Image (cartoon, rainbow, N blue to C red):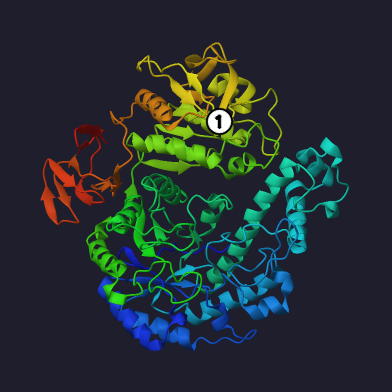
Amino acid sequence: MTTFPPRTLRLDALAYGGDYNPDQWSEETWKEDVRLMQQAGVNLVSLPVFSWPLIEKTPGTYEFGWLDRVIDLLWAHGIKIDLATATATPPAWLVRQHPDVLPHNADGTRLEFGSRQAYCPSSLTFREHALRLTEAMANRYGDHPALALWHISNEYGDHVPRCWCPISAEHFRRWLERRYGTIDALNTAWGTSCWGQNYTDYSQIEPPRTSMGPINPTQQLDFERFSSDALLELFQAEIDVLRRVTPDIAVTTNFMSLFKELNYWDFAAAEDLVTDDAYPDPADPYAHVPAALNYGLMRSLKGGQPWLLLEQAPSAVSWRDVNVPKAPGRMRLDSLQAIAHGSDGAMFFQWRQAKFGPEKYHSAMLGHRGENSRSYQETSALGAEIKKLGAIRGTRVTARTAVVVDWDSWWGSAAPDSLPSQRLDWLAQTRAWHGALYALGHTVDVVKAADLTAAYDLIVVPNLYIVDDDQAQSLTTFVENGGHLIVGPFSAVVDPTEKVHTGGAPGPLRNLLGVEVDEWWPVPDGQERTITPLPGADKSTPLTATIWTEWIDPTADADVIARYEGGVLAGRAAIVRNHHGNGAAWYVSAALTDDSLEELLRLVLEEAGLPTRPTSNRRVEIVTRTDGTTDYTFVLNHGTTAATVSVPTGAHDLLAGTDVTEHIEVPSLGAAVLRHPARYDQDLLTVTIPSKNIEV
């Protein structure tokens, strides 16, 4: 296997710019664009993402002249290129000559050309033509000095994450045969003796199309795995071409934050640089909280390495039911939040607002009014500020807590039928647990259950429905070595083939967690369950659960921290702590409300020796990036009122260009970036928000 030198983004500053679609504009407009880009501080643009039909108008004949002129013009003005392979959407001629390229939905209906991503991921015809274009692009531009990064396809899985066509069916069968070997092994794994679903040959297996009733859950889970792998295989095929032709140039594909359809752990392992498209909803005053979780995933996918925010909206998007613009200051704050969480830049979709097509109402850096547009005024101002933060490039985010994200458990616990309840949503639970840590002042990384390290004091597992032996051993070793672990409900229920663990949940985590689950007791819609107050808490304030509870039996050595009040489960254990080795593992058998989760995680953090805010707060965010000698502390005020923040000794605000002593006031939607000597103690910064003191 060929070994290539390390590859990274070829840019000596924080990246700033966005998607550029010059094929929608005249060459005179290009000249105006580069002038305004320079004025706005743009140093990187992504192109030509959707230009395959203009590059290859007839099969095998490439027209690169217009693209040559654009790239040369940009480079002449000091702007580098995130160069797309242009394979995100096939041209009409390819689809009409080879209609088998088009994907099918679960009903067996072939989807028509007319949007984007009009291809089946398993189509060898599509792959052949896409790879031919990729190689032509690599040969043409691989040595161009403007080339900073390869951008393969675009947002894999956005419109076609799954395909049920005959070609996909054949690919699925090959995937299954590689996974299981014999048909008898597949029958055992899928439990096909249930409902008479036994197979005698792989040719009898189809994707889980629309059927007359519940479909085998293991078949559905394997189809999720296969579908993610099919797109990964397509991605890897383009990577292989680029590695062969341009081995020194980094490659990426733009992710879509915490996206169910693709296992990003696998995709990140294949590429050089993690990039993300992030679109928090301006109508949601707390959209920055799940955004912090998304960014925690992005920086964690490659072990804490810096990543890049490749797309965001300068203001309104065009695809929500109600597309609310970003208030003045929000775009700046959103951009700084991503940089705070490890992004080495801030990019946008797109540079110039379109005059036609589905995205003509999507905001851009340069709006319909040109230089007079609010978006251009604000993005130009941000471009100047980004230059002040150049020293941050390459530094890493500090975090002592992490949340487990596992795609198998997400897919398995989201089966459309046959579960105890359809209300226990994996993403909602993960966001809730992360949100509680955020409210208590913690920056949170994301980890795999089977790849834990001693870098964290606390790891939270909102749900790990599927657990194998390697994951169980990793979690156990983490606790034995002194870590603190807390696991949420409906975890360790089944193995990777969807079989309930012998003896029931939590299977191989039984000894670690000190509990056995007897029955699941989901809560009917509109009802709540109460749980006794936590030790040291206000005895008049019980915890509240909705959606889900469980009948559990703790082992003799486990400590019952809280019990259910009222109803059939009255007096039974609800929350259990089990000391194991040098650490402790907690099990929470209920889906707690946000306030209750905050109270519980406050107790767990304190027992882990970690600080917490005396009063929870989801508006003021403090995140630190460091190079080990110098810290860069971001203070981000997402709230509607000003906040006063104490500052570390020797602090200098990079944005304001001034030294700061004792305190700094950060206005609503404001930010400060404090450079100061690295802090190795655990002292907290104090934040004052009208009449409330909050430790951060």
Q: Position of residue 536 (x, y in %)?
A: 35, 16
Q: In the image, 391: left or right of 569?
A: left
Tell me what residue is drawn at x 86 percent, y 42 percent: 198
Residue type for callout 1: Ile
Q: In the image, 52: left or right of 367?
A: right
Question: In the picture shown, does residue 16 fall above or below 29?
Answer: above
Q: Nearer the viewer, residue 322 or 661?
A: 322
Q: Nearer the viewer, residue 145 or 586?
A: 586
Where is mark 1, residue-wise?
A: 547
Tell me what residue is drawn at x 48 percent, y 88 percent: 65
- Residue 248 visible to the viewer: no
Q: Crowding near pointer 1: few (<14 within 10 Å), some, many (20+)?
A: many
Q: In the image, 240: left or right of 280?
A: right
Which quarter shows the N terminus? bottom right
Q: Nearer the viewer, residue 205 or 164?
A: 164
Q: Position of residue 129 (x, y in %)?
A: 65, 76
Q: Position of residue 266 (x, y in %)?
A: 56, 52
Tell me what residue is drawn at x 47 percent, y 29 percent: 485
Q: Position of residue 499 (x, y in %)?
A: 71, 33
Question: In the picture shown, does residue 428 fall above or below 658?
Answer: above
